[in-house]
Image: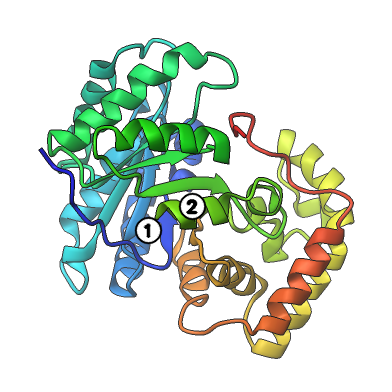
Amino acid sequence: MQTSQKLSLPIMGCGTWAWGNRLLWGYDESMDDQLQGVFNLCVSNGVTLFDTGDSYGTGKLNGRSEQLLGRFTKAYQGVNQENICIATKLAAYPWRLTRQSMVNACKSSAQRLGRNVDLVQMHWSTANYAPWQEGALLDGLADLYQQGLVKGVGLSNYGPKRLQWVYRRFMERGIPITTLQVQYSLLSTYPVTELGLKEVCDNLGIKLIAYSPLGLGILTGKYSDQSKYPKGIRNFLFKQLIPKAQPLLSCLQNIAESRHKTMSQVAINWCICKGTIPIPGAKNIEQAQQNIGALGWQLDSGEVEELDRVAASLEKKMVQNIFQTK
């Protein structure tokens, strides 16, 4: 029985949802070497937390993101090798109804990874649509920890009320919650400013992980030209959001220029200054280098306050994840 493990996490991690999204639309094996290069670059620069999920990749490619991450981990030989931390999220599928279903799901993830999962997370809460389902799934996560199959347990898309409910449930078994993962960026401050999640997490000893810290790429500044907007539903979202976000993008650009940094690096550094662990995605070496450039320096209090003020004044902000609870 394990009740006292400590899981060491870096100040920034790399989210593999970017790989997962690509896999949803067709897998191209020619990118494997490039992705291995991204992985190697991140680890060698101290970015050792890698976040994925068992739902990343569908159909024949189900779990493909985990398979790739396992392959990259095995192939890497170098500095920080012993510090690599693999976090995966287990989906609350409607057919997962028992605690054993979650234990089995994590064992399947470990098989794809070729190693045990370090941090297992509930991908989302079912509280918004099937609250009766959630208890057994959470019990399964707790079982994984107590059976020594994982080093830590985390949650994703939970608000303060539901988080504290889970916290009390886990504490009855002596199991700590290591992390909480939410959508958080200068375009999505809702979890912290309105839900107060950072304060709750601090009080409970939980690390807050910020996914989508670049706001789907909007905060990079690469979508200044409307012709570069992505297709599909994101095109509609960007047309609604980017014109309203111009004051924030201008502020980011001004600070980036004065710091000799990029807008991406300033946006990620802001998340770090807020005491969170940002997990920006990276699909190529250039993106990984950009992300790593957010480390080793810090925005001053005046710059953070200015970004906070402009972000709070925006008329339009990022749509929240539909699974986010309160």
Please say if 312 is above or below 234: below
Q: Most extreme residue toward the left, as rendered?
A: 1
Amino acid type assigned to the residue bearing label 1 in the image? Gln
The residue carrying pointer 1 sits among few (fewer than 14), some (14 to 19) or many (20 or more) residues within 10 Å by Cα, namely some
**Residue 245 visible in image:** yes
**Residue 159 visible in image:** no
Residue 146 is left or right of residue 168, and the answer is left
Residue 2 is left or right of residue 319, and the answer is left
Element on which disc 1 rests: helix
Amino acid type assigned to the residue bearing label 2 in the image? Cys
Percent x, y of residue 35: 37, 55
User: Which image quadrant: the N terminus?
Assistant: top left
In the image, 197 versus 42, the foreground residue is 197
Element on which disc 2 rests: helix
Q: Residue at x 56, y 41 (%)?
A: 160
The circle on residue 201 is 2
Q: Residue at x 34, y 75 (%)?
A: 45
In the image, 189 versus 237, the foreground residue is 189
Question: Are the two marked residues, 1 and 2, in contact with CB atoms closer than 8 angstroms?
Answer: no
Q: Residue at x 81, y 52 (%)?
A: 227
The circle on residue 284 is none
Question: Which residue is under mark 1?
Answer: 34
The residue carrying pointer 2 sits among few (fewer than 14), some (14 to 19) or many (20 or more) residues within 10 Å by Cα, namely some
Percent x, y of residue 251: 80, 74
Q: Residue at x 16, y 53 (%)?
A: 74
User: Which image quadrant: the C terminus?
Assistant: top right
Count of residue discs: 2
Residue 253 in which image quadrant: bottom right
